[in-house]
Amino acid sequence: MLSIDGNLIVVFIIIWVLLIILTKIFFNPVRKVMRKREKGIEKDRKAGEEAVKKYEEIIRKIEEDLKSTRASAYKAREKYEKEAGKEKESMLAEVSGECRAKIEQARKELNEQLDSLKAEIKSESRVLAEKIEQRLLKL
């Protein structure tokens, strides 16, 4: 059977002393380093999560701004296209009016020239008729 003697108590005390010394010299500093590291990792993780949230917020804001900018650009484009269409119509109406006025002016001039040519032909035809008549009578 087992008997408890002085050696067992000495070994037991040595183990406890060794455990206390190792705890103070080795385990506690390792635990401190591990806690510090865990805190740093946690801090970095939180900073990373915040950075991702900020990034997503910025991306969302940029997308909203881009959508609103596209919408305003589309509206401005429609507005300018309507204005250009109205301007085109007014210019066409103006040019058309000017062309009609020029055509009317040209018609008036042609009619005046036609009337003057008719009058001229009438007078010349009388003169020619008289000359023909005189020649026929002479023959």
Image (cartoon, rainbow, N blue to C red):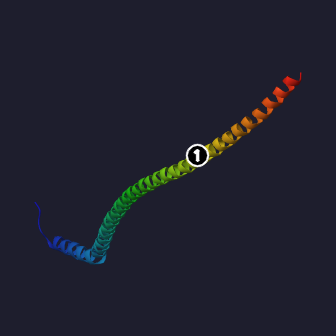
Placement of 31 over or under 105, stated as above or below: below
Placement of 48 over or under 106, stated as above or below: below
Residue depicted at x 83% and y 30%: 131
Residue depicted at x 36% and y 64%: 58
Asked whether, in this view, residue 54 is left or right of residue 116, the answer is: left
Q: Quadrant of the N terminus?
A: bottom left
Residue depicted at x 33% and y 71%: 40
Residue depicted at x 65% and y 45%: 109
Q: What amino acid type is highlighted by mark number 1?
A: Glu
Q: Quadrant of residue 20?
A: bottom left
Closer to the camera in the image, 53 or 106: 106
Label 1 secondary element: helix
Closer to the camera in the image, 139 or 126: 139
x then y, percent, for residue 95: 55, 50
x then y, percent, for residue 127: 79, 34
Residue labelled with disc 1: 104
